[in-house]
Image: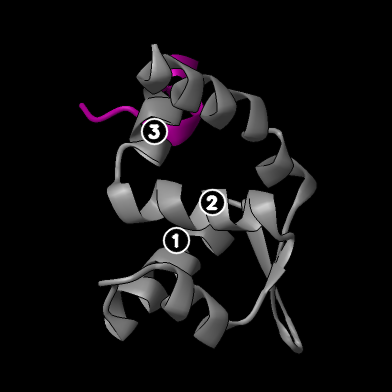
Amino acid sequence: MKKTDEKKCPITAIAELLSDTWTIRIIHSFLKQEKNRFCELEQQLDGISTRTLTLKLKYLEDKNIIQKIDQGYIITSRGKKLQPIIEEMEKFTQK
């Protein structure tokens, strides 16, 4: 029997959310600049395909990490809570 997202271990849930390279880079872009347009993200994320970016943004919308607005996307308050985690990951790689 497969566990639902609600029953997952919190550590497993966050690890799954941040385990994809593009997903974490997109979140990182939003933490640096809260509002982004699709074309700006494409330029910031060198090498990402339009399809992949579209799929990842939809995934992050579904997880309530970002929200689509008229002029692009913004990070949600839930998404902003990821900042300390990502900052610690950056610090860890510098040690």
- Who's the residue at 40% across and 64% down the image? 56
- Who's the residue at 47% across and 70% down the image? 44
Q: Earlier in the sequence, mark 2 or mark 1?
A: 2
- Who's the residue at 62% across and 81% down the image? 37
Label number found at residue 59? 1
Q: Quadrant of residue 18?
A: top left
Label 2 or label 1, whichever lies nearer to me, is 2
- Who's the residue at 70% across and 60% down the image? 33
**Residue corresponding to mark 3:** 4
* Mark 1 residue type: Tyr
> Closest to the observer: 3 or 24?
24
Describe residue 55's horizontal placement relative to residue 38 as left or right: left
* Mark 2 residue type: Ile
* Mark 3 residue type: Thr
> Closest to the observer: 32 or 59?
32
Q: Residues within 10 Å of mark 1 (few under 14, many from 20)?
A: some
**Residue corresponding to mark 2:** 27
Is residue 80 inside the magenta stretch? Answer: no
- Considering only vertical position in the picture, is 20 above or below 22? above
SS of the residue under disc 2: helix
Label 2 or label 3, whichever lies nearer to me, is 2
- Considering only vertical position in the picture, is 28 above or below 61? above
Magenta-colored span: 1-11
